[in-house]
Image (cartoon, helix red, strand yellow):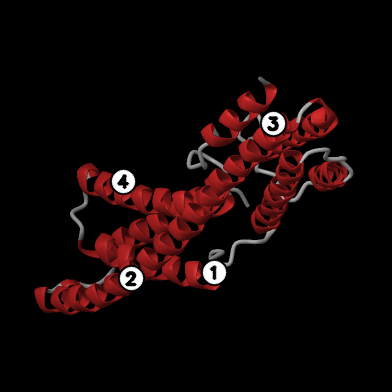
């Protein structure tokens, strides 16, 4: 299920709760809607609202942490790519094949991380691993003549090792993936809260519109959380570091 579908589902469920509350407010006897009853319902729902806010805050925090980690990994990845390119440049013409493989790797990885059309990134494309291993083998087979070339070769291999480490880190599933049971429980709590809102809300268009926009805001928050976890949708990691690395290597 995409983040948009999840957001629409949550909007439908929560707002339907508000409409159910409005309907119940018309059907229940008057003594069920007294000021004393309203006070009890308000206090009870305040407890549920506090719990829901804590869960929503936890989901935002974990998603933000995961997003920040991924963004940091991409920045480090780009730096190591540019360092490797610079080492190979300084090595001399003998490293041209290695630079060609590096250029091929960066091009493939850029398309995987930032696919056209805003699709879901491919974090574990086996083609990039194959090219990266070929690059590592090619750099290892270089024949340094001077001590300077020997040092550049060792530094390039070290940078390639760091690139490979970061690649595997990006390919690993996020450790803070959204817990579906927790998300489901929060949606149920929010629906109950909106039932209570509709129960005592005035029967007019303004009140219903206010309930709709409140439900829409909650659904949008969940969509953003899912976008940060899956690295797709409107909230995406910046492509600028990888674009700079690609431009430098192609220069």
SS label for mark 1: loop
Q: Which mark is residue 179?
A: 1
Question: What is the spatial separation of the Cα atoms under label 2 and label 1, in whole angstroms?
Answer: 14 Å
Mark nearer the N terminus (1 vs 3): 3
Residue mark closest to the camera, 1 vs 3:
3
Quarter location, residue 34: bottom left
Residue 106: image location, x then y, percent: 71, 35
Q: Above or below — where is 226 with respect to 56?
A: above
Mark 1 or mark 2, which is nearer the start of the sequence?
2
Q: Nearer the viewer, mark 4 or mark 1?
A: 1
Q: Residue at x 29, y 59 (%)?
A: 22
Is 153 or 237 nearer to us in this picture? 153
Q: Which mark is residue 54?
A: 2
Please rate how many residues cluster around mark 2, counting C-alpha atoms within 10 Å: few if below 14, some from 14 to 19, many from 20.
few
**Numbered tag placed on residue 213 in the rendering:** 4
Q: Which residue is mark 3?
A: 90
């Amino acid at each position: 299920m995409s983040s948009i579908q999840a957001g629409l589902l949550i909007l439908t469920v929560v707002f339907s709760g508000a409409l159910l509350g409005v309907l119940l407010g018309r059907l229940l006897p008057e003594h069920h809607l007294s000021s004393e009853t309203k006070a009890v319902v308000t206090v009870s729902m305040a407890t549920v609202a506090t719990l829901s806010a804590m869960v929503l805050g936890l989901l935002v925090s974990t998603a933000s942490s995961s997003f920040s980690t991924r963004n940091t990994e991409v920045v480090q990845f780009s730096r190591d790519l540019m360092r490797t390119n610079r080492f190979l440049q300084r090595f001399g013409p003998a490293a041209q094949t290695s630079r060609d493989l590096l250029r091929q790797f960066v091009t493939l990885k850029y398309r995987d991380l930032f696919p056209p059309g805003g699709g879901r990134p491919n974090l574990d494309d086996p083609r990039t691993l194959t090219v990266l291993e070929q690059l590592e083998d090619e750099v290892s087979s270089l024949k340094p003549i001077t001590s300077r070339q020997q040092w550049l070769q060792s530094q390039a291999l070290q940078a390639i090792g760091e690139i490979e480490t970061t690649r595997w880190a990006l390919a690993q599933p996020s450790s803070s993936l959204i817990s579906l049971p927790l998300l489901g429980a929060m949606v149920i709590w929010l629906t109950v809260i909106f039932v209570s809102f509709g129960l005592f809300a005035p029967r007019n268009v303004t009140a219903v519109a206010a309930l709709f926009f409140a439900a829409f805001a909650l659904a949008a928050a969940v969509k953003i959380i899912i976008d940060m976890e899956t690295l797709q949708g409107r909230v995406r990691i910046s492509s600028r570091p990888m674009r700079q690395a690609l431009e430098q290597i192609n220069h």
